[in-house]
Image: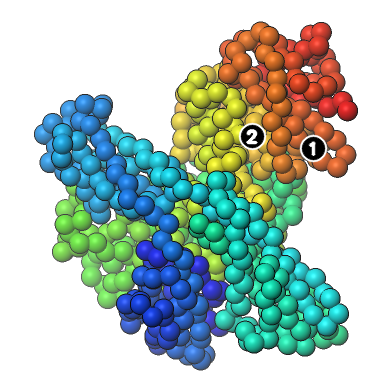
Amino acid sequence: MHHPGPPRFVHVGESVALAPRAPDPDASFAWRLRDAPADSDATVGDGAVVHLAPDVPGTYRLELDAPDGTHSQTVRAFPDPRKPARFRVDPADVDGDVSAAETASVIGQFNDFTMGVDRAEFEDDAWVLDVELPPGDHEGLFAFDDAFDPFASSEVAVEGSGRPRVRLDGRREGDDVVVSATTNAAPDGSDPDVEFHLDDRDEVDEDDVVVDGDELRVLVDALPDLARVHAVAVAERHSVADTLELSVAPDGAVAFDRPADPPAWLRDASMYEIFVREFAGETVDTTFEEIERRVPYLEHLGIDVVWLTPVLESPTRHGYHITDMFDTADDLGTRAAFESLVDRLHAAGIRVVFDLVINHTSRDHPAFQLHRAGVPEYADHYERIPAEQDTSDVDWAGDDAPGHYFTWTRIPNVNFDSLAVREWMLDVVAEWAPVVDGFRCDVAWGVPHGFWKEVRERVKAEDSDFLLLDETVPKRDAAFHENEFDFHYDADLYFALRDIGNGDAPADAIFDALVDTQRHGYPDEAVHMRYVENHDEDRYLDECGRAALPAAAAATFTLPGVPMIYYGQERGVEDSRGTMKWYDGDQELTDFHRRLVSLRDDHPALRADGVEPVDVDVTAGDPDRVVAYERASDDERLVVVLNFGDEPATVEPAIAVTDTDLLSETDVADGESLCVADAVVVRRVD
């Protein structure tokens, strides 16, 4: 079915890409804007993939003529939350001489980190760029003369509330189905109202439903076999939409499903990322077979999910410059060897997450080579930008250059405005989804939302337990939870733990990071990946030191969410992509991580929602380096105390606790206080 999918929710000034599903490059598709708010001048193009940029708030209704009929698409546009802001860099604050600089490209979340789009002006003895930004904290990176040597950053705080949240639930009342919405105000925001929206794919008419405040009612007899209800909370800003599916059986029984919720198994999991080519050790070339021989180590750690960095053909050790989307890398082994590794991990009770890279390819991929060489069939396969916007030092042939992010000239962006590209990337998804248990989606923020919505429906239709993890950093955007991803990078906690470890923030900055997650608008059902490092970041050990690492790791295992260990974190590896330390690793640190995994497995309170700060009196040690909080489930209440300091701290919690540390299984009492070297977990005494 070519229907473009569910209603879309944006704000004025935000463009939305609309495309037919089940893309067929040989078919004919035509869009038209059927209805728009009275004062709108918005238009859509004449391609199969169009971009609508709402210019006034209201509802926009479009139609798509496709081989299987005419389909309706609703786009609801809310008021523009952005406000004028200015990024500013004083040349004296740049770590380098920019006195001769002629230009400065500025990149950030506001322009998808695209070089050459926004250039600063030099005025009043400073480089400045005026932009429109939504409420929150923003960073602009200044690349002088379009290079990052040197570079500078400018931070801007825009006043205003975060995004509210909404949850839908359903029940049967006699002949009616009732869909109820529960809303939560954003931090510093007002109580939201609710808007309900029907799905254009379903045979339910607006006349069939009655909306009263936070409830929608519809007769069971008016429902088709499947109906989808969407809702948005609206206050100063609009929320991420929630969806409820209503399935009607032949006997009239109604089932309710929340398709955006993550798989149930995820909340209990612990994850381990393997940077593939450095895992086997110093003298052994890593292959699928060599990783398989080391699965007992992963079993010993007790982890439940392995995320493998890319395993497809690539000229790079990191694997993100892919030259063949459909075959494994020669140096790692055959497809059969990869599947054997997956089978071995499954036999150990470990799920496998595959690194899906579909935002770009290597520029050595045959498709890009044919594209640049003018082969007609590949003319639309990659983004093209005007030559004057190009900031690379590459002498591209022709009048245009490939689109790319940052300075990533070797990995050009594919063009999702092309149906051929959409078909290609959906084929990649179909190739690997049956083999593994989930995708970690690289540069997820660079791929259109509508495409991810189609991916989700496809993979979940085959396996509802399939996992979708987004890389939306340096972005952190809750919109990717809207019927797209189950699992999200938590960059807020990552940066907070770095600041704490470096002594740039007190330990209770952890709580601010959790509030930031709510401010972004992530619903309570969203699951976040808690981590201290990954393959794109410096090692915590290298940046913050050995003393702070255990407390930081313990935070990721004792806060709500899913902890992720980056290979070697537990062995004392100091290089970001360094060789795994097998014979000379930090065994004490390894044992500590293993105990963290076991502790979280054994105590449901550590996997539950909710965190309550606990006041403590630090009688010895640095109070700014200590933080405590309570975690509770139906059966237990635990108190976690973390010490990021170099020396043990003597800590007296404001509530009564037991003397035994569940993490070390030792008595940590010191009179009425606890002796905390790095992390302790004790039971609360009522």
- Counting the numbered discs, the total is 2
Residue in the picture at 17% in, 28% down: 97
User: Callout 1, which amino acid?
Assistant: Ala
Position of the N terminus by quadrant = bottom right
Tell me where residue 206 sits by quadrant: bottom right
Position of the C terminus by quadrant = top right
Instruction: Looking at the picture, tell me which residue is in the foreground, 568 or 534.
Output: 534
The residue carrying mark 1 is: 632
Left-right relation of 530 to 663: left
Please provide percent x and percent y for residue 50: 38, 75
User: Is residue 474 at least partly visible in the picture?
Assistant: no
Residue in the picture at 69% in, 73% down: 212
Residue in the picture at 60% in, 27% down: 508
Secondary structure state at the residue bearing disc 1: strand
Cα distance between the residues tagged 1 and 2: 16 Å
Please provide percent x and percent y for residue 602: 82, 36
Task: Judge the density around disc 2: few (<14), some (14-19), many (≥20) Cα neighbours within 10 Å.
Answer: many
The residue carrying mark 2 is: 556
Q: Earlier in the sequence, mark 1 or mark 2?
A: 2
